[in-house]
Amino acid sequence: MNKDLFIDTINFIKELNEEENKFNTLLREIDNEFGGGFIHSKSINYITGLLKLLLNDENDWISYYCWEIDFGRKYYEGCVTEADDTPIPLSTPEDLWNLITKK
């Protein structure tokens, strides 16, 4: 997998996730009991699993980037650091690529 395809795929996952969130919000407005997660969840999990496997993402940075820091939107300097506390940028798919591939 090359860098451009990886970035496109992460952006596609982000788009699928945003569509699912919008759909789930609408369904909750109709029925408060709705639990959500019915449109793209399986596809998103499958794609992120493939990326993890293809890039040998042993530390699961892909999941961290997508879910914990909301595709980089919740990133702040210092939330990810090297062992010596040097900040690691992680606000873009390119930053994620660089972290996983150590470039």
Image (spheres, rainbow, N blue to C red):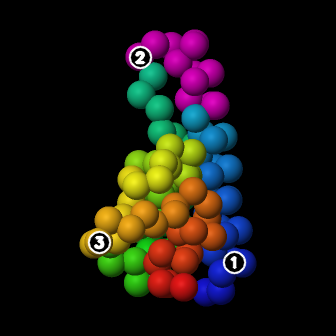
Going by the numbered disc 1, the residue's amino acid type is Leu
Quick check: 9 left or right of 28? right
| Position above or below: 102 against 10 | below
Where in the figure is residue 57, as x and y percent of width and height? 40, 77
Amino acid of disc 3: Asp
Location of the N terminus (image quadrant): bottom right
Q: Residue at x 58, y 35 (%)?
A: 21
**C-alpha span from label 1 to label 2:** 38 Å
Comparing labels 3 and 2, the label whose residue is closer to the camera: 3
Q: What numbered label is drawn on residue 84?
A: 3
Marks 2 and 3: in contact by CB < 8 Å? no
Residue segment shown in magenta: 22-33
Q: Residues under labels 1 and 3: Cα distance?
A: 31 Å
Vertical arrangement, residue 11 with respect to residue 3, above or below: above
Quarter holding the C terminus is bottom right
Q: Position of residue 17 (x, y in %)?
A: 59, 46
Q: Check disc 1 and report the residue beneath it.
A: 5
Instruction: Name the residue at 46% across, 13% down.
Output: 32
Task: Give left or right: position of 49 versus 5.
Answer: left
> Magenta span: helix, strand or loop, mainly?
helix
Residue tagged 2: 33
